Each structure stands twice: as structure tokens, then as C-alpha cells.
Amino acid sequence: MNLKYQKQLVSILTLSIILGTSFNLLRNDGIPWLAKPIEKLDSATDIDKKNEEPTIREINLETAKTLQSSGSLFVDARAEEYLEDGFIPGAIANDDFDILSDSIASLIGYDKRFVVYCSDDDCGSSEELAYMLQDFGFNDILVFKGGWKTWNEAGLGVEFNE
């Protein structure tokens, strides 16, 4: 490659980065530079705090038990083949995001709180699904980070597909 073309390429890339960054900073709804960390809730009483904007918050086992016993919707983020091992009673799951999001919307709407979980605290599927659902318009999403493993090891209720 000729030195002249290399300089042009570097100039174009530099200009693109400067313009992109400038426009992002000037926009009211610019793309955040860093993802906001998920807020951790320590008890079920913390859940009732109303937020002005859509939120994703993390809950522990005790809060998950309280919410499950009160009839809150649980969404299993694991792939469907893992459901053969069991799932939290009443949880819904579907590998097809559109079907899953439509199911949630028809069951509880977009503003009611629900819980997303996956296999364990190392599994990122629950957070990934929570962000996708938030982008889709759901406003109050809780992530049960301990997931299926913590629930099952605690000896809590389990449901199986028939």
C-alpha cells in the first residue's frame, strides 16, 4: 500500500472517530460509554422502591423465594433442553425471544415486575436476556443471580415438563 493511501486511511478513520464521539456526546440519548452496574437488592422490602426509569436489579435467594410465593412471574433464561432438569415452579421459558417477550407481555404487561434467572451465578444468560427485554420495553426486571443451582440446592419447589 502506498504511503499516500495509508495517510488518507488514517485521516478518514481519525475523522470518523472524532465525529462519532462528538455526536454521541451532543445527543440527549447518546450511547453510554460504560454499562451501568446492576443494583443489588438485599431484601424484599427494597423491591418496592419505585424507579423513574426502566431498571434491572439483582436479587438474592430469600427475595426470590418471597416473590415466587407471592405469585411473581419467573422467566428461565436457560436453553429449553436444560429445563429437563427442572425449573422454578410457574416459570416460563422459550428459546425464541419474540415468543417469550409476547408471553411476558400478555401475562403481566410491560410495567409489572418479574424475575429472570439462569443456571447459576456464573451464567450471564439472565443478564443478557434482562437487557434484551428492557430494550424491548419491559420496565421492572429482577435478575436472580444464584439461579437454578442455588434454588435447587436450597431444596425449594421444583417443576418438570411433562
Image (cartoon, helix red, strand yellow):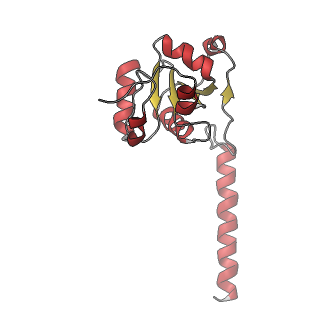
Instruction: Quadrant for residue 66, please give it.
Output: top right
Q: What's the residue at 44%, 29% (across, down)?
A: 87
- Residue toward you, 73 or 15: 73
Viewer can see residue 82:
yes
- Residue toward you, 66 or 115: 66
Q: What's the residue at 65%, 10% (across, down)?
A: 45
Q: What's the residue at 44%, 24% (across, down)?
A: 158
- Residue toward you, 134 or 99: 99
Q: Determine the residue located farthest toward the left in the rendered image.
A: 162
Is 67 situated above or below 123? Answer: above
The N terminus is located in which quarter?
bottom right
Q: Position of residue 109 (x, y in %)?
A: 41, 20
Is 14 situated above or below 24? Answer: below
Viewer can see residue 52:
no
Q: Position of residue 142 (x, y in %)?
A: 56, 25
Q: Image check: 70 left or right of 35?
A: left
Q: Image check: 39 left or right of 94?
A: right
Is 161 situated above or below 23? Answer: above
Q: Position of residue 20 (x, y in %)?
A: 64, 55
- Residue toward you, 10 or 56: 56
The C terminus is located in which quarter?
top left
Q: Image check: 141 left or right of 83?
A: right
* Image mark count: 0
Instruction: Quadrant for residue 103, please give it.
Output: top left
Q: What's the residue at 36%, 38% (across, down)?
A: 98
Q: Determine the residue located farthest toward the bottom in the rendered image.
A: 2
Q: Position of residue 19 (x, y in %)?
A: 66, 57
Is 65 situated above or below 33? Answer: above
